[in-house]
Image (cartoon, rainbow, N blue to C red):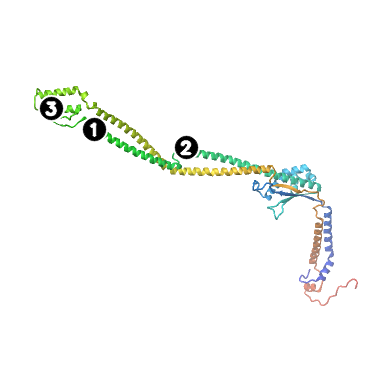
Amino acid sequence: MINPGRSYNVNDYKEIFLRRKLYFVIPFVVIITAAVLWAAVAPRKYQASTLVLVTPQRVPTELVRPTVTAGIIERLNSISQEIMSRTRLERIIDELKLYPDELKSMKREEVVELMRKNIKVEIPKRTAETAGYFTISFTGEDPRVVTVVANKLSSLFIEENLKLREQQAVGTTEFLTSELTATKEKLEAQGQTVADYKRKNMGSLPEQRDTNIKMLEQFQVQLQRNEESLRALEDRKLFIRKQMADLENPPAAGVNADGTAQPQKGALSYEARREELKKHLADLQSRYTEKHPDIVRTKKRLADLEKNKDIMSVKNDPKYREMENSIAAINMQIKRLQGEGERLQVQVGQYRGRIEGATQREQEMAAMMQEYNNTRLLYDTLIKKSEEAQQAENLERRQKGEQFRIIDPARTPEKPVQPDIPKVLLIGLLAGLGCGLGGIFVREQLDRSFRDPEDTEVTLGLKVLANIPKIGSKAA
């Protein structure tokens, strides 16, 4: 095209089309012919589909909670991965004798991949999460075979769903059972620890603090009474010993005419009499000779006293003996009270230790009981969950849970889905038109010939004075 700035009208386009019609006709005819031939000779592929309904659990979820809580998309993806695995698809290929020609020229992995592409699982997009149905379709060249394969795949989906739900229910039950056993052992061990701690600290536990305080007060009162009784016995013992001393050394009652001390009437103390006679003898010897009658008489009395000392001893006095017996009884009571006082002191110290250590034991007990209560709560929760899991397992074993049910089995397709002849012919028509018009456009752009005076003026830069119009064949 020499003059790209030229404006065109309908007549110009018509003239260009008629001049370049071969550039339009040839591509158009070739493409249309190719489309028709493709529609005629292309291999026919048929598709069979199965509609599967997702039936809800037959028992209300308020009574039995299901253990399978995954959504339909997640479960279908899991089941699809299982069924479309190489092992499963090879088993189906061998069982139904699929792709006999492909197996001769292709590897088994390639044939499996080809079958995987021909399987399609579709869920409604708008309600994918809460969809109540889905479709399973299979595409192949034999309408009878694709029907069998589609029904086979739907059966596998149903079986795999039941198997998956049962396995998950059984796995949940086994897990909760093992956790329950471990928690029970832990609970028993903690209970034994608490029992051993209580047994070891029996009497000094926090809940026994009030009792210990009362017992401490009682022992303190008993200890105080014991000390008062000891003091009273010591005072009585001192009083009796003073009386015994008075019996052993009675005071003088008067003085004789000769200047000697006259013993108290009724005194029986041998020791006191001997001392008096010795003093009286010494006094007489200082004044008289040894032959003086008073000295001789005093010596005789002293000798008689020595002869009768056992009879005249104060220890033979019944009153003195009674006092000695009282002293012995008091000593026994004092010893008993001292022993009882020591025991009370030990008891007081023991109960004081219990009361003082109650705070620490209370903290230790609180920590152990908190851990024990937490484990107990966990154990009760696991028991409840284990019972629910057992119910869910029984629900799945009896097939009362959510299931897949075929409501529209695959039927033998009557017409192929590939190739789509109207679509192929329409695409061929549009492609022919596009290629023809494109060929005219490209050829016109490459044309460098003069078609009107404007092309000459633009190319040569000369003004055209006149031109001879084109003379048609009829006018010529």
Q: In what element is the residue under mark 2?
A: helix
Q: Is residue 448 above or below residue 156?
A: below
Find residue 397 and report its horizontal and vertical position in percent.
68, 42
The answer to whether 72 appears left or right of 144 in the picture is: left
Measured in 3D between alpha carbons, the distance from the residue under mark 1 to the one under mark 2, in whole angstroms, is 57 Å
- Mark sitting on residue 243: 1
Is residue 430 visible in the rendered image? The answer is: yes
Say whether residue 272 is left or right of residue 445. left
Tell me, yes or no, if residue 142 can be seen here. no
User: Which numbered disc covers residue 199?
Assistant: 2
Upstream in the sequence, badge 3 or badge 2?
A: 2
Q: Work out whether residue 369 or residue 143 is closer to the camera in this orientation and state it.
A: 369
Pick the front one: 432 or 62? 62
Residue designated by label 3: 282
- Cα separation between marks 3 and 2: 81 Å
Label 1 neighbourhood size at 10 Å, few (<14), some (14-19), many (20+)?
some
Q: Nearer the viewer, residue 270 or 425?
A: 270
Number of marks in the rendered image: 3
